[in-house]
Image (tube, rainbow, N blue to C red):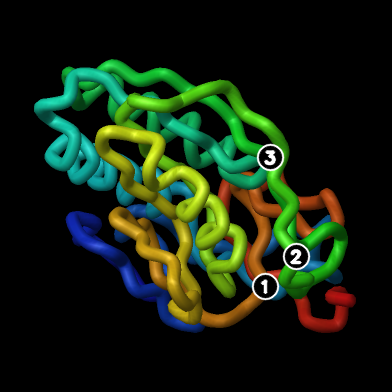
Amino acid sequence: MHKIVKDFSKVVVVPDDGIRLPNEAEPKVREKYAKEIEKVLITKGCIDARIKCLAKEIDGAFRNVGEITCLVILKGGMFFAADLLRALDEQSDIRTRIDFIRCSSYGNRSKSSGKVDIYKFDPIEGNNLLLIEDIVDTGGTLRVLQEKLKDMGKHFKTCVLLDKGVAKGAKVDFIGFKIPRVFVGGYGLDYAGLYRGLPEIVVIKKELLK
């Protein structure tokens, strides 16, 4: 049974069984994904609730700067970033710009290769920067990006939706959920290009992973 969560004002620690809102039914994996997905880990309702609180945290940290440039790590961060920026616009006086960074350490694998490839992005020197990432696993990708970006902005902070708690050397200022060490998909995250469009965070079955 999924744990019922009511308080999203701070980082939510997700148990192995997953979480849902009090008014949500016990989540089930859709039939067409039954052979590939083990379970729903975080429901869309929980994601939405935590994002609203993250927007308040970010507003508090950047309140006096007026404008921030949000650097979104593609491709996984795009769903999270879109909802986060909408929440910021609704709840904050901060104006936001958006740019994208494409980098990869996974390819089509389930484990990071350790090598991080970063593709070019627009000049950002002197801006207030918020780096937005979907998930922190080993922290290798995030660590490389932070080293590259830390001296470019007036203020520089990092926001991630999911943290597995095993990253070394990467500093994260805003975290949505701390999750178990399982391979997840959905809500922008993929395995071999699949599952990005799912509205919730799901656990991919181990036997599917290469």
* Vertical position of residue 36 compared to residue 77: above or below: below
Residue highlighted by disc 3: 102
Instruction: Report x, y in % for residue 184.
Output: 64, 66
Dot 1, how many residues are within 10 Å of its Cα: few (below 14), some (14-19), or many (20+)?
some
* Vertical position of residue 19 compared to residue 1: above or below: above
Could you tell which of marks 2 and 1 lies nearer the N-terminus? 2
Q: Nearer the viewer, mark 3 or mark 1?
A: 3
Q: Please tell me which residue is depicted at 29% across the width and 28% down the height of the picture.
A: 88
Instruction: Answer whether residue 4 is visible to the viewer in this image.
Output: yes
Could you tell which of marks 3 and 1 lies nearer the N-terminus? 3
Which structural element holds mark 2?
loop
Q: Please tell me which residue is depicted at 28% across the width and 64% down the height of the picture.
A: 11
Instruction: Report x, y in % for residue 122.
Output: 58, 22
Q: Nearer the viewer, mark 2 or mark 1?
A: 2
Which structural element holds mark 1?
loop
Q: Amino acid at mark 2?
A: Lys
Residue highlighted by disc 2: 115
Q: Please tell me which residue is depicted at 32% across the width and 46% down the height of the picture.
A: 157
Q: CA distance from mark 3 to mark 1?
A: 21 Å
Q: CA distance from mark 2 to mark 1?
A: 19 Å
| Left or right: 115 as drawn, with respect to 200 | right
| Left or right: 162 as drawn, with respect to 109 | left
Instruction: Report x, y in % for residue 41.
Output: 53, 68
Instruction: Answer whether residue 18 is visible to the viewer in this image.
Output: no
Could you tell which of marks 2 and 3 lies nearer the N-terminus? 3
| Left or right: 73 as drawn, with respect to 32 | left
